[in-house]
Amino acid sequence: MAVRKDTKEKQISNLQLTLERFDNNPILKPDPAHLWETKAVFNPAAIYEGGKVHILYRAIGETDVSVLGYASSTDGLHIDERFDKPAYVPREPFEGVTPFQPYTAGMTSTYISGGGGFGGCEDPRLTRIGKQVYMTYVAYDGHSPPRVALSSINLDDFLARRWYWKKPVLISPPYIVDKNACILPEKINGKYVIFHRVFPNILIDLVDDLDFDGKTRWLEGQFKIPTRALSSDWDSLKVGCGPPPLKTKDGWLLIYQAVGSCDESRYKIGAMLLDLKDPTKVLARTKKPILEPVVSYENDGWKAGVVYPCGAVVIKDRLFVYYGGADMVVCVASTKLNNFLDELSTNHKEVKPLSIAAHPVTKAAETKPEPELGYCLYCNEMKAIKKPRHVVLKNLKHAVQGICPDCGRKISRLIKGTESSKKNKRKP
């Protein structure tokens, strides 16, 4: 049967806005030989430097603490090198407990995502600016709302795999769930551009420098890229940045992840083009996903129905997108960049590419969460635990531990594992 010309052209157009999965996916799986990555490896950051794709991926092992592993590839598809030790581990209280401490209890925190019950360093993004490689990631202490953290490393040390990371610092305000942060690889009008997500929108901040002190200065959410308005749209429920945007001839290419109201359980991938001179303006945006979770390794894992991009590189004229499948494995998909850009910029233009101001998210920090309570043996009553954190006691039981605000002595509260904690439901 003959195919009408306009129908055939539409089919070709749709193909040009689709990522092609690598036949040998997943490219990284959990490794039973390494205790720190036996359960899951996923959500990989990536940069292309020195003729290699350098991948930092989130890993979860026997302690349920998220650490970051390292692997590399010369062709973008096949892994040539994989380190047997983490490249980055939790070092600060806001990143949770030590990753090498065993435990047996389940977690009950509202914010567990991806199986990392004891917190740690989650979902990294990498950006090179000059001779420095900046890493943004989700810092989670096991009980407080997850926040955006920032660290960096000298490019030469990074390429030599000398992990001399700068002391990490929190850059998003307390008491607010803030994730999916990445930094634009160039300044715009003398400003650094930082993307992040407070449910349900992508937020954008323009800052003078990256010297956050972790105490007084936070991301504000000056501009936003909102979810689509119609509940039938594939990205109507929440949107978040994937990899740091890539500079192209048509604009900054932003790969993003989203969930729609009509399909709330599945994470999908789309693309946007942002104005080169003003990346707060969206020039084009895919009307449909460019990758959906349909194959087995995107559905068999900690969470079914997840394709979650954190890294992207261009090698010659091909775009490679690195993503986590089902919160369990690392995968890659690719496409011919020029064809992709031509289709996106021509047939998926936004009607009005406006810069949308957002209400500062720091206002939400005025509302504090409910305090953790524990029984003080010296005061002989329940007290709000000061500086609470999750610990493993000598009897291997899990507890929230801190200081009594009145007498200053140590107090704790045991946490019992529950069936609901094992379901590992994502929260905004």
Image (spheres, grey):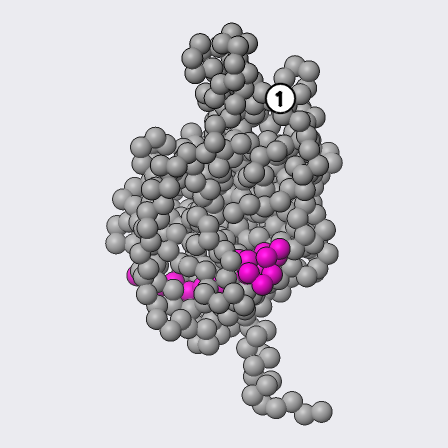
- Which quadrant of the structure image shows residue 394? top right
Query: Residue 312 location in percent, x, y?
Result: 52, 55
Nearest the viewer among 133 and 273 is 273
Majority SS type along the magenta span: strand
Q: Is residue 78 magenta?
A: no
Q: Residue at x 47, y 15 (%)?
A: 404
Neighbourhood count class around disc 1 (C-alpha, 10 Å): few under 14, some 14–19, many 20 upward:
some
Query: Residue 316 location in percent, x, y?
Result: 51, 62
Q: Which residue is mark 1?
A: 414
* Residue lying farthest to the front in this orientation: 381
Using the image, determine if residue 88 lies above or below residue 405.
below
For the N terminus, give its image quadrant.
Answer: bottom right
Nearest the viewer among 90 and 357 is 357
* Residue lying farthest to the top in this orientation: 378
Q: Residue at x 55, y 16 (%)?
A: 375
- On the question of residue 77 being in view, the answer is no
Query: Residue 233 location in percent, x, y?
Result: 52, 67
* Type of amino acid under label 1: Leu
Using the image, determine if residue 172 lies above or below residue 376.
below
Q: Residue at x 50, y 62 (%)?
A: 236
Q: Which residues are magenta?
A: 258-277
Query: Residue 11 location in percent, x, y?
Result: 60, 79
- On the question of residue 375 being in view, the answer is yes
